[in-house]
Amino acid sequence: MSKISRRKLLTTGLLATAGATGLGAAAKLAERYGLIPPDAGVLYGTGETLSYAAQRLFARHSLAPEFARSQISKDPFANPVSPLGAEFQHLQEGGFADWRLAVDGMVAKPVSFLLAEIKSFPRSTQITMNGCEEGWSYIAEWSGPRLAHILSLVGVLPQVRYVVYRSFQPDWWDSIDMADALHPQTLLAVAMNGSELPVPFGGPLRLRVPRQLGYKNVKYITQLTLTDNLKKFGKGLGSASPEGGYAWYAGI
Ligand SMILES: Nc1nc2c(c(=O)[nH]1)N[C@H]1C(S)=C(S)[C@@H](COP(=O)(O)O)O[C@H]1N2
Ligand SMILES: [Mo]
């Protein structure tokens, strides 16, 4: 089934659940379950907003499609990033030995992991698609520890609802809810197609959240912050993306 028709089906399901009273009732249902995305009202109408609620109510544990090794793209496209600068180059020259991932916010025990520690954690491997909102996509094999594993090491407080993730590039930050954060396909990728994750593809550390579009898959991850409320981050929209016209929830 195409992405669009699946989305439409899910939203229709939510509307059906809400009954003949329609969109307004569905929106109330979404609100009751705390499923209003942080950028609701900024960019989209009710129907679009409801695709997030519908996914979480009816397909919370759905899996992104996985592919055969023979389907891996021969020539994956790395979307160019703005210059990473001298500090990044210095880290790269040192084999990223000093690259750190800070995990903080609403946790029992804030931790700063060295890249070597992250690489020593049990890895999960997936062959999934990375798709840009501009229309192109490629299939690759990614591996790295599950985000859920990293979170299990820091003592996530029960009221946490979102993981905010930041990049070495300050303009790139985003967040996902706990359904995606704890999802088995959500990884902190350290390898791609059997080699170290190349810098153009986000090396040394990239968030892979294959249930969402490419732009949620932020490269050069340096920090994870657990929170119960996205209002205090940036402009309060849960990500830099809605500020530029892209939805916070980019489920496929
Ligand atoms: N740090 C950082 N992460 C980023 C970007 C970026 O410019 N900087 N571009 C995003 C966009 S718009 C897309 S579509 C994907 C592209 O992934 P690719 O380079 O592996 O094709 O990375 C995303 N992650
Ligand atoms: Mo993109």
Image (spheres, rainbow, N blue to C red):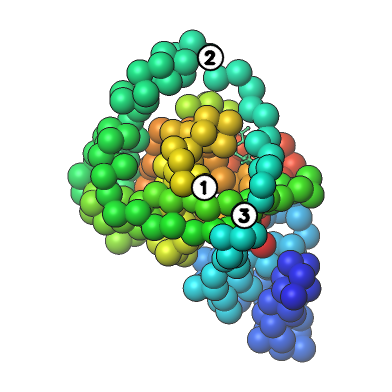
Give the number of the disc on residue 193. 1
Q: Are marks 3 and 1 in contact (CB under 8 Å)?
A: yes
Query: Looking at the image, can residue 188 be seen?
Result: yes
Classify the position of the N terminus by image quarter: bottom right
Relative height, residue 180 to residue 246 (above, below): below
Q: Residues within 10 Å of mark 3 (few under 14, many from 20)?
A: some
Q: CA distance from mark 2 to mark 3?
A: 31 Å
Q: CA distance from mark 1 to mark 2?
A: 26 Å
Q: Nearer the viewer, residue 33 or 187?
A: 187
Relative height, residue 233 to residue 184 (above, below): above
Q: Ligand 1 falls in which quarter?
A: top right
Relative height, residue 116 to residue 175 (above, below): above
Residue found 62% across the figure and 54% down from its top = 72
Residue 16 place in picture, x, y as percent: 71, 86
**What residue did someone put label 2 on?**
85
Give the number of the disc on residue 233. none
Q: Amino acid at mark 2?
A: Gly
Q: Residues within 10 Å of mark 2 (few under 14, many from 20)?
A: few
Residue found 26% across the figure and 45% down from its top = 120
Under circle 2, the secondary element is: helix
Residue 31 place in picture, x, y as percent: 58, 68
Q: Nearer the viewer, residue 78 or 62?
A: 78
Image position of 43 (left or right of 145): right
Image position of 41 (left or right of 35): right
Q: Between disc 1 and disc 2, whose residue precedes?
A: 2
Residue 234 place in picture, x, y as percent: 54, 35
Residue found 42% across the figure and 42% down from its top = 190
Relative height, residue 46 to residue 16 (above, below): above
Q: Amino acid at mark 3?
A: Ile
Under circle 3, the secondary element is: loop
Q: Between disc 2 and disc 3, whose residue precedes?
A: 3
Q: Amino acid at mark 1?
A: Asn
